[in-house]
Amino acid sequence: QKEVEQNSGPLSVPEGAIASLNCTYSDRGSQSFFWYRQYSGKSPELIMFIYSNGDKEDGRFTAQLNKASQYVSLLIRDSQPSDSATYLCAVNLRTGFQKLVFGTGTRLLVSP
Amino acid sequence: GAVVSQHPSRVICKSGTSVKIECRSLDFQATTMFWYRQFPKQSLMLMATSNEGSKATYEQGVEKDKFLINHASLTLSTLTVTSAHPEDSSFYICSARTGGIGNQPQHFGDGTRLSIL
């Protein structure tokens, strides 16, 4: 089992729809969770981070964390073509305190 | 805030050349910096973790004598690819994190695209 798993996609949604991106992790003791967006040929940029169970909202983005089920998700409301990118889930595993473990990413395609 | 600058953005050089990449945190002090490489259509692969004033911690399979890391100050880390060969061609990305605990986010530089001829 991979430490952080994401569906590679692509996830295709029409403009204006809600995009839902999911991530599961293996270490129940994981403490912090991050979502990064990476455009093709560019480096990742931080979108959101979440530490506590529940929802955290920032503009059109909502991160959801469920530690009991060991999953974290990212919702993008009113999706725009400019949101088309690969979304990386990253987890700070308890066993690797300093570093983040990244999923392979989910490619999102938003069609006009 | 939390801006990380990485230079150069692109390097093309001959096989056998050593290449130095700089990573700077511009508006914060980074006690920990990380170096990643990414091959086309693959995810990030952590190469090493760099703490200011101490030796870097390399991931399994990464040759420390080939990828020299120096973190001499709280705002600068460098990665030197020694005697680079075509198989070292990749996208190298650094990141920096504030604070000494792992739950702070990492902020990434723009990356360096290295092409070895």
Image (cartoon, coloured by chain):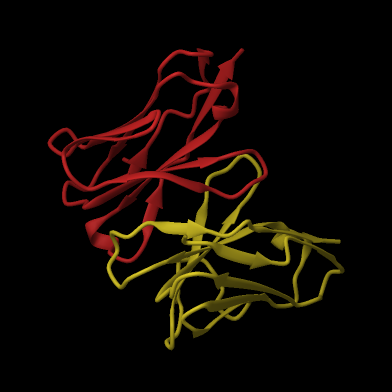
Chain colours: A red, B yellow
Q: Position of residue B103 (x, y in %)?
A: 28, 59
Q: Is residue B94 left or right of residue B112?
A: left
Q: Position of residue B80 (x, y in %)?
A: 66, 77
Q: Position of residue A33 (x, y in %)?
A: 30, 47
Q: Position of residue A66 (x, y in %)?
A: 18, 34
Q: Which residue is at 86% across, 61% downward? A: B117
Q: Is residue B57 left or right of residue B26?
A: left
Residue A58, quarter of picture: top left
Nearest the eye: B86 or A60? A60
Nearest the eye: B86 or B46? B46
Above or below, comparing residue B16 to residue A75 in the picture: below
Q: Which residue is at 40% across, 21% downward? A: A77
Above or below, comparing residue B56 to residue B37 in the picture: below
Q: Is residue B20 left or right of residue A59?
A: right
Give the number of callouts: 0
Above or below, comparing residue A107 to residue A93 in the picture: above
Q: Which residue is at 40% across, 28% downward? A: A60
Above or below, comparing residue B99 to residue A101 in the picture: below
Q: Is residue B31 left or right of residue B117?
A: left
Q: Which residue is at 48% across, 29% downward? A: A8
Nearest the eye: B73 or A70? B73
Nearest the eye: B105 or B91? B105
Instruction: Residue lying at the far left in this picture: please name it.
Output: A68
